[in-house]
Image (cartoon, rainbow, N blue to C red):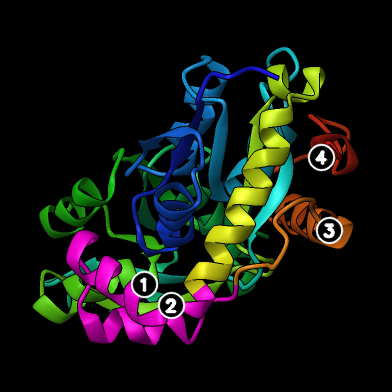
Amino acid sequence: MSSEALRIGFVPEHFSTPLYFAHKHYGLHATLVPFPSGTGHMITAIRAGEIDIGIGLTEGWIAGLGKEGIQGDGGYRLVGTYVDTPLCWAISTGAQRPEIASVASLKGKRIGVSRIGSGSYVMGFVLADQQGWLADNTHFADTVVLQDFENLRRAVNSGEADFFMWEHFTSKKYHDSGEIRRVGDIYTPWSSWKIVASTKLTESADGRVKTLFEKLDQGIAHFNEHPDEAVEYISAELGYTEPDAKEWLKTVKFPAHTHGVKDEVMTNCVGVLRKAGVLVEGKGLGASAMVVRL
C-alpha cells in the first residue's frame, strides 16, 4: 500500500464537516482539495489525475459516466456513500426579477449552471421532467455555464441567466440578505452524495481506499456525537449562521458505514436521468458498471 497521502476533492460546504473531523481527529492521511464550483469540476480533475478521490453529488458522478462519448474508461468509479438523505436544491432568481414569480414561470427561460454535467445542470432536466416540460422540447431557452455559485448569483441579477439551482442552506443566507430571491425547492429522488475513486486506484485495489472508509466512518460518528462542535465549525469556518447550521443538522443523515453503493440508488438515478434526457439507454456505462466493490 502506498504511503502517499490521498488527494481528496470535496465541496467546501456544511456537508464536508465529517470529512474535516476525520482529517482533524482521526488521522485521515490525505490532502483535502476544495472544489467550490462542485462535482463537475471534480470530474475534470479526477480524469486529469489531479485528485484520487472525489466526494460529490450522486447525479453528477452518474451523469459523467453514463453519457454518450465517454473517453477511455471514464476515469473513476463510484465506491462509497457519503450522505443517505436527498439533497434539497433551492431554485433562485435575481432580487429584481418580478416576471419570475413561480416555478411555472421558468419554462422557456435561461438556466444558469456551474458546468455541463454538474448537479446544477442535471437537476435542470429533473425539474423539467417533473414539470412536464420535456415533451415539446421547449423547457429552457438556453443553458448558461457560469462556473461557480458567485457567478450564478451575479448572472441572475444582471439578466445573463434567469434562474439557477444550488443547495438550500448554502443559498439561504443570500435569500435572507436579499441578494437573490427564492422561487421554490426541488429534492433529488435519490441519496445525495457519493464517493468516487480514480480507476487507477480501483484497478490496483489500493488499500488506502479501505482506510479512507474507516476514517470517514469515524468522522461521521464524531459528527453525530458532537453536534455542538459541528455547528461551531460550520458557522465559524464555512460562513453559515448558527441557526441555519442547527436546522441543517435536523435534515441530514450520514451512513454509519460509507463503503459501498446501493444498487437501487444507481438504477433509480440512471432511470430518472434517462427519462429526463440526460442519459441515453445503450450509451455510456450502465448502472452496474459505474460501481466497483472494493
> What number of labels is visible?
4
Mark 1 and mark 3: Cα distance apart in space: 27 Å
Q: Find residue 226 and name its label.
A: 2
Contact between marks 2 and 4 (CB within 8 A): the answer is: no
Residue 48 horizontal/vertical position (percent): 51, 14
For the point 29% across and 40% down, the residue is 146
Mark 1 and mark 4: Cα distance apart in space: 31 Å
Assess disc 2: are there few (<14), some (14-19) or many (≥20) residues with their C-alpha within 10 Å of its C-alpha: few
- Camera-side residue of 213 and 247: 213
Assess disc 1: are there few (<14), some (14-19) or many (≥20) residues with their C-alpha within 10 Å of its C-alpha: many
For the point 29% across and 67% down, the residue is 234
Contact between marks 1 and 4 (CB within 8 A): the answer is: no
Amino acid, disc 3? Lys
- Where on the picture, by quarter, is residue 15? bottom left
Mark 1 and mark 2: Cα distance apart in space: 6 Å
Amino acid, disc 4? Val
Assess disc 4: are there few (<14), some (14-19) or many (≥20) residues with their C-alpha within 10 Å of its C-alpha: many
**Label 2 secondary element:** loop
In this picture, residue 289 sits left or right of residue 186: right
Question: Does the segment drawn in magenta span residue 246?
Answer: yes
Q: Is residue 92 visible?
A: no
- Camera-side residue of 120 and 55: 55
Q: Find residue 130 and name its label.
A: none
Q: Nearer the viewer, mark 1 or mark 4?
A: 1
The boundaries of the magenta stretch are: 224-253
Mark 2 and mark 4: Cα distance apart in space: 32 Å
In this picture, residue 97 sits left or right of residue 172: left
In this picture, residue 158 sits left or right of residue 24: left
Q: Which residue is mark 4?
A: 291
